[in-house]
Amino acid sequence: MPAPDTVISRPHPLLVDALVAAGFDATDVHFTPLRSGTDSIPFAATTRDGRQLVVKVRRAGSLFRYPTAAWASARMREAGIPAAEILWHSREACVETRCPGRPIEAEPPTPQDLDAAARAGETLRRLHSIEVSSFGQLDGHGIGQHATIQGWFLNLAPRKVPSLDGLDLPALLHRTRFILDVGSNRLPQGTPRLLHGDWVGRHVFTDDRQITGVVDLESARGGDPLAELAGWSLREPAPMTKALLGGYFDGPLPADRLLPLVLFRLRIAYSLLHFHASCDDHDMVRLRAAQLQADLDDLDHGHLSAVPRITPDARSNARRRP
């Protein structure tokens, strides 16, 4: 995680209690805030014996996902993936090891970042070699919510459509949902694989030689690996996606995977648009709408691409990620 900025002089008792419950001496430990996520508020902590840790506190109203992270961390580490190790967790807090290195994010991407993205692709391929029993968000035992890929793919809860000047969002979202319904039968059939669930540059660490850490495992799920590639491509600059794909595949993207990849992009952009709307982030709503429109138009004309035509530039991507 990025270097912390501010030391908290009077930490919340839950932070101290979490360290003690994990078996550490919390005397005189300083907590420094890290970049917050949707579900957790994380803090860096260094114990008296020099252990570098991250303590996370669940946001009010968010889901209880630390058992999921612990299960996924154990499976990933067994496969040789340098995931953050979950040392202790409860419903409200989590203590994990702090990964060395830096997250793969720069504006614009440097040659070192592109090399790291290629290595991240290799790491992701190893992650996707892990089989799970079902699709969707995993629980603390590695069990997903859906028995079929279609059940997972089409599990899109109805949400209020935002209204923005100059955009006919109801029509765009209706058209997208129609394509998703029709296209669900074109998805590949096979054993679900372990997915990180939020695979973006800021969650993958590097020391500029190798991948040194994978963090934020609370969104782990079972699914098709193409969904993970699609999610990265929507939220990272195009050169980073090309680099990731180059590390993931031993050659070009197989032709039979192109349509499913685009369908997963539509599904993820559809969900992200509603998420941004719930946060009143109109700039990001417009970005997701443009991505949906571009992929729908490309589907109409039969001009599909592994890299989206519209991607966030490096600066806006680093500043406004969900």
Image (spheres, rainbow, N blue to C red):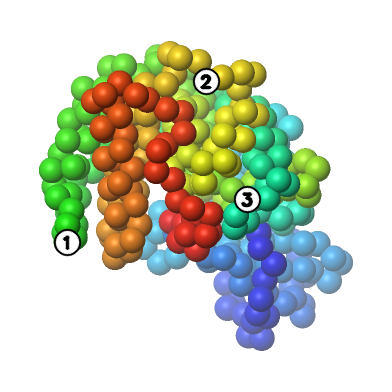
The residue tagged 2 is 253
CA–CA distance in space, label 2 to label 1? 38 Å
- Does residue 297 appear in the picture of this structure? yes
How many other residues sit within 10 Å of disc 3, few (<14), some (14-19) or many (≥20)? Answer: some
Quadrant of the frame with the C terminus: bottom left
Mark earlier in primary sequence (2, 1): 1
Residue at horizontal 65%, vertical 59%? Answer: 1
Q: Which residue is mark 3?
A: 109
Could you tell whether 164 is left or right of 191 in the image? left
Q: Which mark is residue 65?
A: none
Residue on which disc 1 sits: 165
Q: Nearer the viewer, residue 2 or 49?
A: 2
Helix, strand or loop status at disc 2? loop
Disc 1 to disc 3, how far (Cα)?
33 Å
**Residue 104 in the image, given as x and y percentages of width and height:** 65, 50
Task: Evaluate if marks 1 and 3 touch, with contact meaning CB atoms under 8 Å apart.
Answer: no
Quarter of the image for residue 164 reads bottom left
What is the x, y in percent for residue 256? 43, 13
As drawn, the residue found furthest toward the bottom would be: 9
Label 3 element class:
loop
Circle nearer the viewer, 2 or 3: 3
Mark 1 residue type: Asp
Q: Sequence-wise, which precedes: disc 2 or disc 3?
A: 3
SS at mark 1 in the image: loop
Image quadrant of residue 153?
top left
Q: Residue at x 64, y 47 (%)?
A: 204
Question: Which of the two discs, 1 and 3, labels the residue nearer the N terminus?
Answer: 3
The image quarter containing residue 182 is top left
**In the image, residue 74 lies at what x, y percent?**
66, 38
Say which amino acid is labelled 2: Leu
Kind of residue at badge 3: Pro
